[in-house]
Structures are given as structure tokens and as C-alpha cells.
């Protein structure tokens, strides 16, 4: 059990990434009833935008800024205006299928215009370890965890403590009433898309040094975050965070104490158990079905 | 009547000349995307380079070589469909795939069509099933793993070994042979860890290796995962020497893993750092054309085409049915066919025998420490 602490830290760091991505699922679901099956590819793309900027000669810090801005334009603004808005009128299912097509499109485009091979990606956190309670803990793990926690804290503060956040929640919970009381619902929904784009760009920046920049890296990540969002509660931001952290830790503990051979199955089994006993997710809110 | 005969003779001559001038068609199915994209891209580039060279010098028996490339997406199911499609076009020889799992499901198709398949897979079982149309461009695990186990036991003096492998046909095949050999030699396997292709987090696996405290660690994963585990091994301070095969110390792994690759050792059937003049020349040509240093898969693709050339010239005719028979038992000398790079011999199973190398990564570069002779 001596490495339990290390496993917990590494699991929490990976889980924090899943949480960031899973939050995007819940944000979009709450405001526009959109399930974005391209969410994993949304995390993959910003890393390539940053790499492209660096190849063009930009220093890393400038590439990060450009990558985040371009992500917000492409994965926030353009995604909403060119895909979600036109498809929304046809219902949730066609929209979900359209996002699957988008995922394939993004992957193929990156493969075609960049490379099918993995590329190294610089880390914003220095490599090396720090001693905590007698354990050598990777600075990268801590960095990922801290940045992810700060991002999520910032998001929850925005949602719960500011007028803007209250307007966003009102727009998500009852758009009709929100409109009547003067909330600019469309603008609030757009803001949600932009926040999601910012979060995926941040996740991309944190995770790519570990996962490596590769056109297919969104597949695993999107699946893990989707499971995390369902386990935690698809309609609650805090649920997505809890789900992400749980899946990250569970994966590492299962690999270490159960079997490395069946580690991929463990989150899926956990998902099935949660759905069987608590279909709305661990921290989710049961929604009444409208007939 | 006479003019009719003359026209007929002319037409026959034109048609025959046309047939003679027809290109020799090769079909390549490789991992151009997916987990094996590094493998497939190098393999494809090696093929293209060889074909360009051969055609520039007049082709094979006066005919140009032509190749069609298809993407298996590193997926055995897709590979099977692509190979079937390629065979429908009746190529002279089939090249690829590189992944053992994909070779396993496609080899019966090529054998049924009677077309020789020159591939990059290394799983031991591939050439053990009596398929008379399957040929390797690199050592099978039944040849390489005993050399690896011997090195771990004799040179590293390891009494206890941790074995970490990727859970697919490639990884399982290597793991089975090396564990058996280590056991036979008297080195105890104290940790036997399977990992997933595409796995990102190796903290738990390395934690287990650390807890087992082995004298040496044998790492047998695909390139990208090798880079990730090397980083994690370094991060967790594992100091036991690392031993692997080509996939642990390849150029791409070194590029991705950075400093963490330093000190890793591996047995390689082929490396562009080999102290062989023809290989050095290949490396130069390849790097000039593609702007990067190829890994062993670039060499494999290049060799595959020169195997086609040498065998066809030995036969003196382009005959896909006789091709496999001719290649079995054939020795191709680099002095006669420089494109083959080193003297090679193919046995009755399609397995290859030639020199191999013991490599260590020193300051981000492969350094050949030993040249190991041909087995026979």
C-alpha cells in the first residue's frame, strides 16, 4: 500500500482532466440540450493549433494565447453558429449525429494537414518531482490538478456568485421565463459555448504533454469524460467534476490492486452499476419526463 | 492478303511491346493512421523510395514498378477488407501490413490467392502455421526474443526481471517467448504486466514494477506507449536497466520520450544507426527525401521492394505464382543487390536470417554496442 498516495495523486491529476472535459458536456446539455460527441476531438484540436503557431515561429506563450483564442472562435462561436443552431431545429438526435460527423471531420483534417504520427508537446509545468509527506510527487501532476481545480472553482464562482452566472443559470433552467424577465438568453448560451471552448483548450494544454499530440487522442479522452459526466450526473457541473475525479482514481487503483489487464473494463463496469442504481448519476438531479 | 498479314504482325508487335512495357503492380496495405501510423508511414516511405530508385535505373526486367497504398487504420478488420480489395486487382506481390494482428487475419487471403505477402509483423506464430506465401522483412519473435533473454541473463546479470507488454498479438507473442526463455535460463519473472494499446497513464504499472524491485525491466510496447512508460519510469526513479526491442529505442520513441530514453537498451534487427555502409547510405537518401530519420520500418519497406526485385531477377520472369517458391531458401547478397543492405537468407517458413544489433540510447541517439551474427 506504500504507493497508494502516488496512485491517488496521479489518478486525481488524470481525473481533473476528465472533469474539465466532462464539465463541457454538462454545460452544453444544460443550456442547449446538446450532447457533443466531438468533445474529445475538441480537446485534441487546440494542441495542434498551438503546435501550428509554434511551427510558424511563435514562442510557446504566444502559441498558447493564439491556440485558446482560435479554439474559442472555432469550437465555441463557429460550432454554435454553423452546426448547433441550424441542426437544433431538427431535434437532439440529428444534432448528436452531426457532432459525431464533426468528430470524424476534425480527426481527418488534423491527420491530413498535420500528421498521422504523434508529436511531442511542451509542458507549461516544469518536469521533476516535489516531496510531499515523504513521497515524490510529479510537478506535472500537481500542476494539472491545481490548474483544473482553479478553472472549475472559477467556473462555479461565475455561475453561483455573479449576476452573469445567475443569468446563465436562468437561461439554462427556463429560457422562456428568462426572456420575459429580460435575460439575453441567446447571449448567455453563446457564452456557455465559449466557456466550453476555453475549458477544452485548457485541458488540451495540460494533457497533451502526457498523452502526446495525436489526431486520435480525443477518442479515449472523450469516452472517459462522457462516462465521467454520466457517472457524476449529466445535468450538474459538480457531478461532472466528481465523476471525472472518481474515474481517474478508480482507473489507477484498479490497475494497481485488481489487474492491469482489465483496467479498461473497470470504468465501464462502474458506469453500469451507477446507471442501474442511480440513473441520474451520483450527484445528478432526476428530471421528470414530459409526455 | 500480304498487307493484312503485315498489319496483323504490326498489331501483334505493338500489343506485345505494350505488354512488356506494362508496369509490375504491387499492392501495399499499411497502418497509415491509427495507433500504428508511425509504423505504416515509415514503411510506405521506404517502399516509395525503393520504387523511385529502381524505376530510375530502368525498373525490374525492363518494367517499371508501380504501387498502390491502402490504409488499414491499424485495425485488423479494416486491413482484411483492404487486402481483399487489393488482391482483387491481382497485384504481383502484396506488401504489408506491419502489425502482427493485421498480418494474422490477412495472410490466409493472400495465400488463397497464391500471392506472396512480404510483411513487417514480428509475432512468432505468423510463420509457424505453414503458410507458404508469407515472408518477413524482420526477425520473428522466435528469433529475436531468445537473443533478448540471453542478453538480460548473461550481460545484465539479472536474476529477477519485470516484463511489461502491450496486450495485442505483437505484445503477447513477444511476452510468451521471452518469459519462456528467461525461465529456461534461470532469470525469475517477478512482475508480468499487461498494458493497453493507446494507454496514457502508466503510473500504476510503474508502481508495480517499483514494488517488485527487479534487476532488469523488459519493456515490449508500441512506440508511443514506450515513450510514455519511459517518462514514467524516469519520473518514479526506477533505476533498473531497461531492455527492449526495436520499439523501445526507435527514433520516434527517442523524439517523444526525450531524456527519459537515455540508457534504454534493445535488440534490433534493423537500425539506421547500424555500422553498415549501405544502411548509412539509405539513411542519407531517406532523410534527404522525407526530412526525417526513418525508424526500422522505413528499412523494412525499402527491403521489401528489393526482395521483389532480387527474386524476380533471379527467376528471370514476372510470375507471381512462382515468386514464393523462388524466395524460399534464397540467399540475397548485398554485393549483388545493394538495395538488400545486408546479406539475407529466407528459410522454408519465410523467416529471415541476417546480422542484428544491440543498441543503447546515449544522449538521445542510438549507439550500436554489438553486432550479432547470422544464426545459421
Image (cartoon, helix red, strand yellow):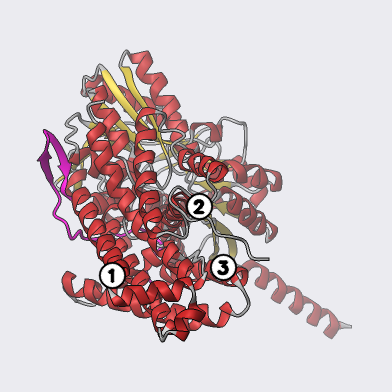
**Mark 2 against mark 1, which lies toward the viewer?**
1
Q: Residues within 10 Å of mark 2 (few under 14, many from 20)?
A: many
The part of the image, by quadrant, that contains residue A221 is: bottom left
- Looking at the picture, tell me which residue is in the foreground, A81 or A74: A81
Q: Residue furthest right?
A: B1
The quarter of the rendered structure image containing the C terminus of chain A is: bottom right
10 Å neighbourhood of mark 1: few (<14), some, or many (≥20)? some
Would you say residue A28 is visible in this rendering? yes
Say which residue appears at 44% left-offset and 76% top-offset.
A171
Numbered disc 2: secondary structure: loop
Q: Relative to residue B176, is residue B217 drawn left or right?
A: left
Of A270 and A53, nearer the camera is A270
- In the rendered structure, does residue B362 fall within the stretch colored magenta? no
**Residues at marks 2 and 1, CA–CA distance in whole angstroms:** 44 Å
For the point 64% across and 67% down, the residue is B20
**Which sits earlier in the primary sequence, circle 3 or circle 1?**
3
* Marker disc for residue B74: 2
Query: Which labelled disc corresponds to residue A158?
Result: 1
Q: Main secondary structure of the magenta part?
A: loop
The residue range painted magenta reads A113-139
* Residue B48 image point, x, y percent: 45, 63
Question: Mark 3 — residue?
Answer: A96
Q: Callout 3 environment at 10 Å: few (<14), some (14 to 19), or many (20+)?
A: many
Amino acid at each position: 500500500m506504500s504507493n497508494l498516495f502516488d496512485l491517488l495523486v496521479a489518478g486525481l491529476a488524470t481525473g481533473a482532466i476528465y472533469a474539465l472535459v466532462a464539465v463541457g458536456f454538462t454545460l452544453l446539455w444544460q443550456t442547449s440540450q446538446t450532447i457533443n460527441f466531438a468533445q474529445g476531438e475538441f480537446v485534441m484540436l487546440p494542441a495542434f493549433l498551438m503546435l501550428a503557431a509554434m511551427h510558424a515561429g511563435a514562442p510557446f506563450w504566444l502559441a498558447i494565447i493564439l491556440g485558446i483564442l482560435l479554439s474559442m472562435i472555432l469550437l465555441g462561436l463557429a460550432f454554435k453558429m454553423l452546426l448547433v443552431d441550424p441542426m437544433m431545429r431538427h431535434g437532439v438526435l440529428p444534432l448528436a449525429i452531426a457532432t459525431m460527423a464533426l468528430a470524424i471531420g476534425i480527426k481527418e483534417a488534423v491527420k491530413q494537414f498535420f500528421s498521422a504520427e504523434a508529436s511531442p508537446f511542451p509542458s507549461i509545468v516544469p518536469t521533476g518531482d516535489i516531496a510531499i509527506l515523504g513521497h515524490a510527487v510529479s510537478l506535472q501532476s500537481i500542476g494539472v490538478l491545481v490548474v483544473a481545480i482553479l478553472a472549475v472553482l472559477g467556473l462555479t464562482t461565475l455561475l453561483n456568485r455573479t449576476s452573469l452566472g445567475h443569468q446563465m443559470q436562468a437561461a439554462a433552467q427556463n429560457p422562456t421565463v428568462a426572456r420575459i424577465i429580460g435575460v439575453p438568453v441567446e447571449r448567455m448560451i453563446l457564452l456557455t459555448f465559449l466557456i466550453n471552448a476555453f475549458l477544452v483548450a485548457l485541458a488540451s494544454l495540460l494533457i497533451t504533454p502526457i498523452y502526446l499530440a495525436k489526431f486520435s487522442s480525443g477518442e479515449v479522452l472523450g469516452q472517459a469524460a462522457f462516462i465521467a459526466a454520466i457517472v457524476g450526473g449529466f445535468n450538474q457541473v459538480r457531478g461532472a467534476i466528481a465523476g471525472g475525479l472518481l474515474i481517474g482514481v478508480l482507473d489507477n487503483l484498479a490497475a494497481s490492486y485488481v489487474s492491469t489487464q482489465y483496467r479498461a473494463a473497470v470504468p465501464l463496469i462502474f458506469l453500469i452499476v451507477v446507471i442501474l442504481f442511480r440513473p441520474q448519476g451520483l450527484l445528478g438531479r432526476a428530471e421528470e419526463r414530459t409526455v | 492478303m500480304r498487307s493484312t498479314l503485315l498489319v496483323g504482325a504490326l498489331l501483334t508487335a505493338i500489343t506485345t511491346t505494350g505488354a512488356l512495357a506494362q508496369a509490375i503492380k504491387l499492392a501495399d496495405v499499411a497502418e497509415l493512421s491509427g495507433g500504428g501510423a508511425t509504423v505504416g508511414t515509415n514503411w510506405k516511405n521506404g517502399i516509395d523510395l525503393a520504387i523511385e530508385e529502381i524505376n530510375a535505373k530502368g525498373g525490374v526486367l525492363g518494367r517499371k514498378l508501380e504501387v498502390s497504398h491502402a490504409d488499414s487504420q491499424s485495425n485488423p478488420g479494416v486491413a482484411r477488407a483492404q487486402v481483399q480489395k487489393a488482391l482483387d486487382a491481382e497485384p504481383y506481390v502484396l506488401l504489408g501490413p506491419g502489425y502482427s494482428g493485421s498480418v494474422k487475419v490477412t495472410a490466409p487471403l493472400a495465400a488463397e490467392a497464391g500471392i506472396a505477402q512480404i510483411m513487417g509483423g514480428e509475432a512468432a506464430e505468423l510463420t509457424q502455421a505453414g503458410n507458404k506465401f508469407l515472408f518477413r522483412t524482420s526477425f520473428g519473435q522466435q528469433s529475436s526474443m531468445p537473443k533478448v533473454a540471453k542478453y538480460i541473463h548473461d550481460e545484465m546479470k539479472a536474476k529477477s526481471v519485470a516484463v511489461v507488454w502491450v496486450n495485442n498479438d505483437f505484445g503477447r507473442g513477444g511476452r510468451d517467448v521471452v518469459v519462456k526463455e528467461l525461465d529456461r535460463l534461470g532469470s525469475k519473472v517477478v512482475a508480468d504486466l499487461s498494458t493497453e494499446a493507446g494507454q496514457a497513464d502508466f503510473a500504476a504499472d510503474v508502481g508495480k514494477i517499483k514494488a517488485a524491485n527487479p534487476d532488469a525491466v523488459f519493456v515490449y510496447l508500441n512506440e508511443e506507449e514506450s515513450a510514455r512508460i519511459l517518462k514514467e519510469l524516469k519520473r518514479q526513479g526506477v533505476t533498473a536497466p531497461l531492455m527492449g526491442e526495436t520499439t523501445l529505442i526507435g527514433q520516434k520513441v527517442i523524439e517523444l520520450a526525450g531524456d527519459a530514453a537515455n540508457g534504454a537498451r534493445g535488440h534490433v534487427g534493423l537500425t539506421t544507426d547500424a555500422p553498415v555502409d549501405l544502411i548509412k547510405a539509405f539513411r542519407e537518401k531517406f532523410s534527404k527525401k522525407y526530412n526525417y530519420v526513418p525508424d526500422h520500418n522505413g528499412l523494412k519497406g525499402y527491403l521489401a521492394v528489393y526482395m521483389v526485385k532480387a527474386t524476380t531477377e533471379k527467376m528471370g520472369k514476372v510470375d507471381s505464382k512462382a515468386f514464393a517458391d523462388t524466395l524460399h531458401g534464397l540467399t540475397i547478397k548485398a554485393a549483388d543487390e545493394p538495395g538488400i543492405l545486408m546479406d539475407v537468407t529466407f528459410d522454408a517458413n519465410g523467416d529471415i536470417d541476417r546480422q542484428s544489433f544491440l543498441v543503447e540510447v546515449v544522449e538521445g541517439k542510438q549507439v550500436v554496442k554489438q553486432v550479432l551474427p547470422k544464426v545459421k
